[in-house]
């Protein structure tokens, strides 16, 4: 009898304990699981409907947000890396029963390890474009036209140095095209084209120095309109990318209307219309509307280490776009009517983040050229500048943002930790937060956030903005493979295979020679003249080696040494050492990395 009573009390206590806590049915990925895909979602499945309680989940020690749907808690994890172990820790009370808030989760913890990055199959570029006839095509568009449709993995097109005077049209049925230039300074695609416009209406008017009348100016402008430009297909942009999963690096895209005329109307250099487009180390130049981002709120774009130049609304439209360490340059025509420039003119509609400029650099062509961060165009724009560095010529208007333009009141137009040329913080105390436009019922007024906190700034990261639910990882595309260490073996230069390389580019005195699948190359002349770089599966070209026989591998070296230097002006053009004024130095280190520094030479 006594034993039966004790057992009854035990079961009652057990039931009470169960009733006081939520029960976990399953954690995904499973605890201790290996070879987990980097696109995996992290979820906790309970036995009853749940709601959010107090506190936050931790992912490898960092707090993360979570959401709930019925019995499932979904953790908003950052992008996963290959070959990495992750641990989820959920404190007590983060989740509660939807029907009984007194029932909470107990402490939950589980770990999993992602799979190793797969080694790609060796392969060469699918096509080479060269003006001198040594490639497969002498036109970039010809190579695009010949590419197969409906690809599900990259089709690699290598574009040799040269000035390609042509329009680029990439149709919707050609996704995964990767255009890789030999050298950004010398691989140039350009054309002169602009939108239709009335020379006497809404713009600065005709060029009186070159054209006696507005009619003559109008006839000149008409010759570059989209409907009249050869092969434009009625599209008013120099490079029109209408396909998903496009990637480009080391190419300059010039719309010569903006570059030459320094005037209105719209003259787009680059327009991408679809999701998942990425650029690395590219240049785009025009005057008005240089860079048009995707039109849909759900579309994403990643732009890293690129140079974008213009004056009027020269980055505009929709989508979640992450500008990472880019150089933004303002140019002017200096007509009496040209009072300022505007970087962005967003038309965001339903985006979560909008435009995010992270660690970017803002410069001006001439001293005291003024600039606004931007102005609202349509819908509910969002733009944030983080850690923006100003050069010594730019004049950033104290209000930061223009209060009136299109038909929109922005949600957030803010900058955080903007620095002047001398390193001090820019005074943001007068930043504008009031906006207005003329609506059908009169003046529409509203306010936007012009400041964000340190905590809010910490959330504007690549991991939060770009990967999305499909775990798109363009940052892996832009990773530079390390420089091979070259040795001399008789008439051969040799090197160890570089992990994740599909092929190697051979150069002599930093001039392109060819590609090879081998880890050796028969050379002539001095071995020190020859260099090699590795190419990854996306066509991205890695760090350039030192000359054969001049570099000694030293894994125990405490600090890499400088093996080469390149110098650039603020427009991204290569200059000689000792350049007078502000210049950028790229230091190539013996471990394959590159350091970037800015200098002011007053001598």
Image (cartoon, helix red, strand yellow):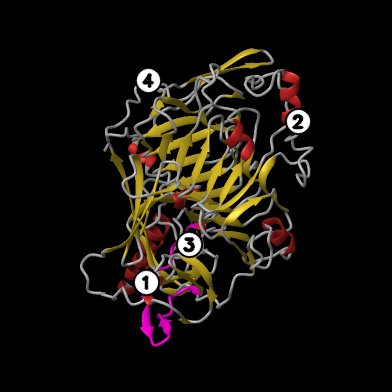
Callout 3 environment at 10 Å: few (<14), some (14 to 19), or many (20+)?
few
Callout 2 environment at 10 Å: few (<14), some (14 to 19), or many (20+)?
many
Q: Which mark is residue 476?
A: 3
Left or right: residue 512 compared with residue 238: left
Marks 1 & 2, CB-CB < 8 Å contact = no
Q: Which residue is mark 2?
A: 222
Q: In front: mark 4 or mark 2?
A: 2
Regarding mark 2 in the picture, which secondary structure is present there? helix
What residue do we see at 31% from left, 34% from top? 421
Q: Which residue is mark 4?
A: 430
In space, the residues marked 1 and 3 are separated at their CA atoms by: 27 Å
Q: Which residues are magenta?
A: 475-502
Which SS type dominates the magenta stretch?
loop
In space, the residues marked 4 and 2 are separated at their CA atoms by: 43 Å
Q: In this orientation, which residue lies closer to the viewer: 488 or 299? A: 488
Q: In the image, is residue 146 part of the stretch drawn in magenta?
A: no
């Amino acid at each position: 009898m006594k034993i039966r009573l004790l057992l009854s009390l035990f079961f009652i206590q057990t039931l009470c304990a169960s009733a006081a806590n939520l029960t976990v049915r399953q954690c995904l990925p499973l605890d201790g699981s290996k070879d987990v895909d980097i696109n995996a979602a992290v979820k906790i499945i309970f036995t009853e409907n749940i709601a959010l309680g107090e506190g936050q989940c931790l992912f490898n020690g960092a707090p993360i947000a979570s959401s709930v749907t019925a019995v499932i808690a979904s953790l908003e994890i950052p992008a996963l890396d290959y070959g990495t172990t992750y641990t989820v820790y959920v404190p007590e009370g983060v989740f509660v029963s939807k029907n009984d808030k007194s029932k909470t989760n107990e402490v939950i913890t589980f770990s999993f390890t992602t799979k190793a990055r797969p080694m790609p199959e060796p392969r060469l570029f699918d096509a080479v474009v060269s003006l001198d006839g040594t490639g497969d095509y002498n036109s970039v568009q010809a190579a695009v036209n010949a590419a197969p449709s409906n690809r599900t993995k990259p089709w690699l097109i290598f574009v040799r140095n040269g000035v390609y005077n042509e329009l680029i049209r990439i149709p919707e049925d050609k996704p995964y095209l990767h255009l890789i230039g030999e050298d950004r300074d010398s691989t140039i695609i350009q054309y002169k084209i602009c939108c239709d416009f009335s020379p006497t209406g809404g713009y600065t008017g005709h060029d009186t120095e070159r054209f006696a009348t507005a009619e003559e100016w109008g006839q000149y402008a008409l010759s570059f309109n989209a409907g009249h430009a050869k092969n434009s297909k009625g599209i008013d942009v120099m490079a029109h990318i209408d396909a998903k999963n496009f990637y480009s690096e080391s190419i300059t895209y010039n719309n010569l209307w903006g570059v030459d005329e320094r005037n209105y109307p719209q003259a787009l250099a680059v327009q991408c219309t679809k999701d998942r487009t990425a650029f690395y180390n590219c240049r785009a130049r025009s005057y008005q509307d240089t860079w048009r981002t995707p039109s849909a709120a759900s579309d994403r774009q990643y732009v890293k280490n690129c140079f974008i130049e213009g004056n009027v609304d020269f980055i505009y439209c929709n989508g979640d776009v992450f500008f990472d360490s880019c150089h933004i340059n303002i140019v002017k025509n200096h007509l009496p009517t040209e009072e300022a420039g505007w970087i962005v003119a967003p038309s965001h509609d339903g985006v979560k983040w909008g435009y995010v400029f992270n660690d970017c650099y803002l410069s001006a062509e001439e001293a005291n050229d003024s600039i606004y961060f931007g102005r609202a165009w349509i819908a509910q724009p969002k733009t944030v500048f983080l850690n923006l560095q100003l050069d010594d010529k730019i004049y950033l208007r104290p209000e930061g943002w223009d209060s009136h333009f299109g038909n929109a009141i922005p949600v957030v137009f803010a900058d955080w930790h903007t620095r002047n040329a001398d390193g001090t913080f820019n005074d943001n105390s007068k930043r504008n937060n009031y906006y207005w436009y003329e609506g059908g019922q009169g003046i529409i007024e509203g306010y936007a956030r012009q400041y964000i906190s340190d905590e809010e700034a910490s959330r504007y990261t690549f991991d939060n903005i770009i990967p999305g639910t499909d775990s798109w990882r363009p940052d892996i595309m832009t990773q530079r493979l390390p420089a091979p260490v070259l040795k001399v073996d008789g008439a051969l230069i040799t090197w160890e295979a570089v992990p994740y390389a599909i092929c190697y580019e051979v150069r002599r005195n930093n001039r392109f020679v060819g590609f090879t699948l081998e880890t050796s190359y028969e050379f002539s002349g001095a071995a020190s003249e020859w260099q090699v770089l590795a190419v990854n599966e996306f066509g991205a070209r890695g760090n350039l080696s030192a000359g054969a026989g001049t570099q000694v591998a030293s894994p125990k070296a405490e600090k890499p040494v400088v093996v080469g230097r390149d110098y650039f002006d603020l427009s991204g053009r290569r200059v000689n050492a000792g350049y007078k004024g502000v210049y950028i130095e790229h230091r190539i280190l013996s471990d394959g990395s590159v350091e970037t520094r800015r200098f002011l030479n007053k001598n």
